[in-house]
Image: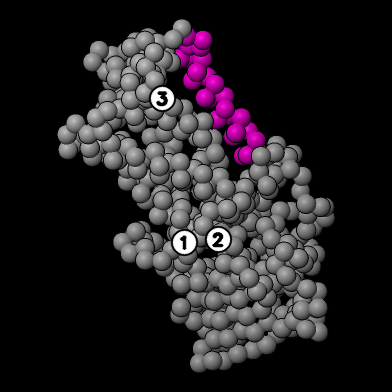
Amino acid sequence: MPRSPSSPAFWRSPLRGPWFTSVLGVVLLAGITVLFVTGLLSYAAYNPDLSPVNDQTPDKGLLGFYLFSWPTHPSWLYRLTQGVHVTLGIALIPVLLAKLWSVVPKLFALPPARSLAHALERLSLLLLVGGGLFEFTTGVLNVQLDYIFPGSFYPLHFYGAWVFFAAFLAHAVLKTPLALRNLRHIRYEQPSGEGELVSPNPADPTVSRRGALGVVGGGSLLLLATTAGRSFDGPLRETAVLAPHGGPEPGGGPGGFQINKTAAYAGISPTETGEEAWRLVVTGRDGRSVRLDRPQLLQLALHSSALPIACVEGWSTSDQWWRGVRLRDLAALVGHDDPVDVFVESLQRHGAFRRAALRANQVADPRSLLALFVNGEDLTPDHGYPARVIVPAAPGVLNTKWVARMTFGDL
């Protein structure tokens, strides 16, 4: 028996073959394309071209070519795009692992390069495998809130995505025609001349290729069923047993819906949010500034909006009823009759998004509020008391909690 992985006879599974690999490849072709597009949309939703505060990706250069003002309609836009991105990514893990298993003999094939074209193909395969494992691993760690990788998740995942997708695109251009030809062999026969994945000395089969695909599909469905529920409320959320924001809602009452960071985690003490201590500083044109306590904010015109919260980890809530002062009305207090950008600062002292910038179109939306109430009651400390920003379709981290200062103007 060959002992070297570079020998074709070393790999004895009778499941490997062009048809099996092609089925998995076509599924990944569609799924990873959706992941890449929704990932770019998530990056655009953070408005990285607006302010260095929001931009966690240095020296992106031409890789930021697609950026645009993130819309506020429909209000559930980010909830949908990021929910699809994260849930689909998790559900594709069994498919990715099965695909890598099916082609692993090619990774050890010798000689490493038979020609320049073959060398380029092997290099793209290395970037494809390494990039895929990196992207899926960092994505899962981010969803599980386990930041064990060095540096910030945002630039790592962003640059990794471009490397991975470039290799994926090159591989797809080279292999998709062959994969489609292989899929026409519906009787699981190996096409003539395409047997480099077929073992010359296969072991006895213990499962059919149909059964193997069923195992892979069943694993994907299991992951889908145990993670997708965190994008919903009620009983469905309790099915998300593999997600940190799954399970029962955190408490009951008007404030009994999901949060990301608690007041205690953010270091917010009751003494600095009490009516005697807390003041909102609003600054605008020509340095004009006003200081407002919560009773003074309550004397301004109050409006209500039904808006969800959706976060980059893929979890979201249904619409909550928020009530507060429109952002555009606060801008008018300091001389901006036409909506402009705003820079929001929190009482939170640490964390990448204790400060955030919003575009003028977000300030202009009549549903964008400095919220003081939720579901008919005062904000709870964990939901941002005494005041928080809530903007339709914006990622959750841009809906700043425990707001202390707002600076309106071109950023």
Query: Which image quarter: residue 384?
Result: bottom right
> What's the residue type where badge 3 is placed?
Ser
Q: Main secondary structure of the magenta part?
A: helix
Q: In the image, residue 375 lies at what x, y percent?
A: 76, 60
Is residue 337 at least partly visible in the picture? no
Which residue occupies 60% across, 59% down? 396
Q: In the image, residue 83 lies at what x, y percent?
A: 56, 46
Task: Quote the CA–CA distance across marks 2 and 1.
Answer: 8 Å
Q: Secondary structure at mark 3?
A: helix
Q: Quadrant of the N terminus?
A: top left
Q: In the image, residue 348 lies at what x, y percent?
A: 67, 72
Question: Is-magenta flag for residue 325?
Answer: no
The numbered mark at residue 394 is: 2
Crowdedness near tag 1: few (<14), some (14–19) or many (≥20) residues, C-alpha within 10 Å: many
> What's the residue type where badge 2 is placed?
Ala
Front residue of 407 and 382: 382
Q: Which residue is mark 1?
A: 70
Which residue occupies 28% across, 36% down? 122
Q: Is residue 398 left or right of residue 99?
A: right
User: Do tag 1 and tag 3 residues touch (Cβ < 8 Å)?
Assistant: no
Q: Is residue 67 left or right of residue 408?
A: left
Query: Which image quarter: residue 345?
Result: bottom right
Which residue occupies 26% across, 33% down? 112
Q: Is residue 81 above or below residue 262?
A: above
Crowdedness near tag 3: few (<14), some (14–19) or many (≥20) residues, C-alpha within 10 Å: many
| Magenta-colored span | 205-228
Q: Is residue 80 above or below residue 219?
A: below
User: Do tag 2 and tag 1 residues touch (Cβ < 8 Å)?
Assistant: yes
Give the mark, 1 or 3, whose residue is nearer the N terminus: 1
